[in-house]
Image (cartoon, rainbow, N blue to C red):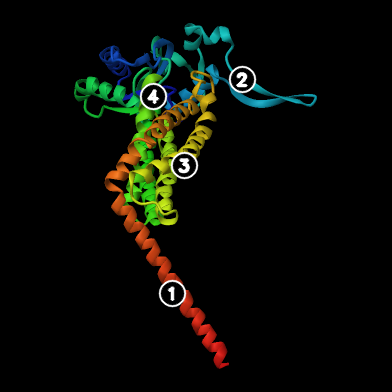
């Protein structure tokens, strides 16, 4: 829709001479034909077809007092016809078209003898004011950005679209530098929309990470603990990348969406585990020991597995629908999320306890102390307000 080309990669060559456009497009096709991953490589179908040309002679037109428009209008009416009235047949209406009969329109001698009326009266033959001859011309002339253009297009299979386009640009670099002045090459197709979407997704991904960090910091009142929760992201990405590699997929817009969706799902398990660490120390008398970490892991094993399973099992039918029509977008998303859930859940009880044991005890202790201090201040404030109310009632 954006480029007018139904291909993943569209290389548009803009110029003036149609014959030169075709030759240079064929040269570009030969230069990139052996690039790995390219499929269905073809140049836009543009060939010369037989034509009958009628070229008005300006000098003779001036002698007869005619204008080019007069000749063009006359030829158009003779060859294509002109609606001059309507024919009514009951409730139906038909256009009345005036034009030459087919046997005359295809006969050059008959065309030469066509009589054109002169402004001052009389008439003259068409061959007296125009040159009529057989020739050839392009079957179609495509224009864009007020320039003639021809398209070299292809699809990509078994390799990343960005990588293929990068190699195509490298191969076509010397040919682009040899183009005449005013000629240029433009890359479009699905690659154009993927570039735009990739930039937008990258921005939204960064915004999502910042938003996650702020929410976690508000929850734990500790940057250390917030970052420890977000450690789930690289642990999840390990499985996602492995899943893409095992299924023979490449990084696409759909898989990028899957990565962003995975961020929230993977972080949820970390929140459950770290929050339980704090709960055991704050409310159940546990200390900052290995036994507390072991107990928290056993307590949260079932909830973590249940959240991962409910998210993953629902996506299994989509992950097994490779190649089915209508699943082109959902299949990569499901693959990324399932692979990420497997790795993040497995590493959740290996990496996170060790990480919390190494660098998390001090930060967690400060977070609990800050939380207790806020509660103590809140209790004192409430007691003071209660006392003031009692004193006011007593005075009254």
Residue 284 appears in the figure: yes
Kindly identify the residue that appears in the image at 37 percent across and 31 percent down: 192
| Distance in Å between CA atoms under marks 4 and 3 | 33 Å
Residue holding disc 2 = 98
The mark nearer the N terminus, 4 or 2, is: 2
Look at the picture and state if 82 lies above or below 280: above
Q: Which of the two discs, 2 and 3, sits closer to the camera?
A: 3
Badge 4 marks a residue whose secondary structure is helix
Q: Which of the two discs, 4 and 3, sits closer to the camera?
A: 3
Kindly identify the residue that appears in the image at 34 percent across and 30 percent down: 238
Look at the picture and state if 364 lies above or below 193: below
| Distance in Å between CA atoms under marks 4 and 2 | 66 Å
Query: Does 52 sit left or right of 175 as displayed?
Result: right
Q: From this viewpoint, which residue is outermost toward the bottom?
A: 395
| Distance in Å between CA atoms under marks 1 and 3 | 35 Å
| Distance in Å between CA atoms under marks 1 and 2 | 101 Å
Query: Does 174 sit left or right of 245 as displayed?
Result: left
Q: Tag 2: Cα neighbours inside 10 Å, few (<14), some, or many (≥20)?
A: some
Badge 2 marks a residue whose secondary structure is strand
Q: Which of the two discs, 1 and 4, sits closer to the camera?
A: 1
Q: Tag 4: Cα neighbours inside 10 Å, few (<14), some, or many (≥20)?
A: some
Q: Position of residue 329 (x, y in %)?
A: 48, 28
Residue holding disc 3 = 299
Residue holding disc 4 = 244
| Distance in Å between CA atoms under marks 1 and 4 | 57 Å
Which disc is residue 380 wearing? 1
Badge 1 marks a residue whose secondary structure is helix
Q: Position of residue 214 (x, y in %)?
A: 37, 53
Q: Which of the two discs, 1 and 2, sits closer to the camera?
A: 1
Q: Are marks 1 and 4 in contact (CB under 8 Å)?
A: no
The mark nearer the N terminus, 1 or 4, is: 4
Look at the picture and state if 180 lies above or below 133: below
């Amino acid at each position: 829709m954006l480029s007018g080309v139904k291909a993943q990669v569209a290389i548009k060559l803009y110029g003036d001479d149609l014959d030169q456009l075709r030759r240079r497009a064929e040269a570009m096709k030969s230069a990139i034909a052996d690039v790995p991953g390219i499929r269905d490589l073809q140049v836009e179908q543009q060939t010369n077809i037989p034509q009958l040309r009628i070229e008005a002679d300006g000098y003779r037109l001036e002698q007869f007092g005619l204008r080019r428009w007069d000749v063009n209008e006359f030829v158009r009416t003779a060859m294509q016809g002109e609606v001059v009235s309507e024919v009514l047949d009951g409730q139906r209406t038909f256009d009345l078209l005036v034009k030459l009969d087919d046997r005359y329109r295809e006969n050059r001698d008959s065309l030469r003898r066509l009589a054109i009326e002169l402004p001052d009266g009389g008439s003259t033959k068409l061959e007296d004011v125009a040159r009529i001859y057989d020739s050839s011309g392009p079957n179609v002339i495509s224009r864009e950005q007020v320039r003639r253009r021809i398209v070299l297009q292809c699809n990509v299979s078994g390799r990343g679209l960005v990588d293929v386009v990068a190699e195509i640009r490298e191969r076509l670099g010397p040919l682009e530098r040899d183009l005449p002045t005013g000629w240029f090459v433009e890359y479009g197709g699905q690659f154009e929309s993927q570039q735009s979407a990739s930039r937008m997704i990258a921005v939204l991904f960064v915004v999502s990470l910042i938003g996650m960090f702020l929410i976690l910091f508000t929850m734990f009142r500790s940057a250390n603990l917030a970052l420890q929760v977000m450690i789930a992201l690289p642990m999840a990405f390990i499985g996602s990348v492995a899943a893409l590699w095992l299924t023979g997929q490449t990084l696409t817009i759909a898989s990028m969406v899957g990565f962003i969706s995975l961020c929230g799902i993977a972080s949820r398990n970390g929140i459950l585990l770290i929050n339980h660490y704090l709960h055991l120390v704050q409310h159940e008398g546990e200390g900052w020991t290995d036994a507390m970490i072991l107990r928290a892991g056993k307590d949260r094993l079932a909830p973590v597995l249940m959240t991962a399973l409910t998210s993953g099992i629902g996506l299994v039918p989509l992950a097994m629908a490779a190649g089915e029509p209508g699943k082109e977008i959902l299949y990569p998303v499901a693959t990324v999320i399932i692979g990420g859930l497997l790795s993040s859940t497995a590493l959740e009880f290996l990496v996170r306890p060790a990480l919390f044991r190494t660098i998390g005890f001090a930060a967690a202790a400060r977070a609990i102390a800050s939380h207790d201090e806020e509660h103590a201040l809140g209790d004192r404030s409430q007691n003071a307000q209660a006392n003031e109310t009692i004193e006011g009632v007593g005075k009254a």
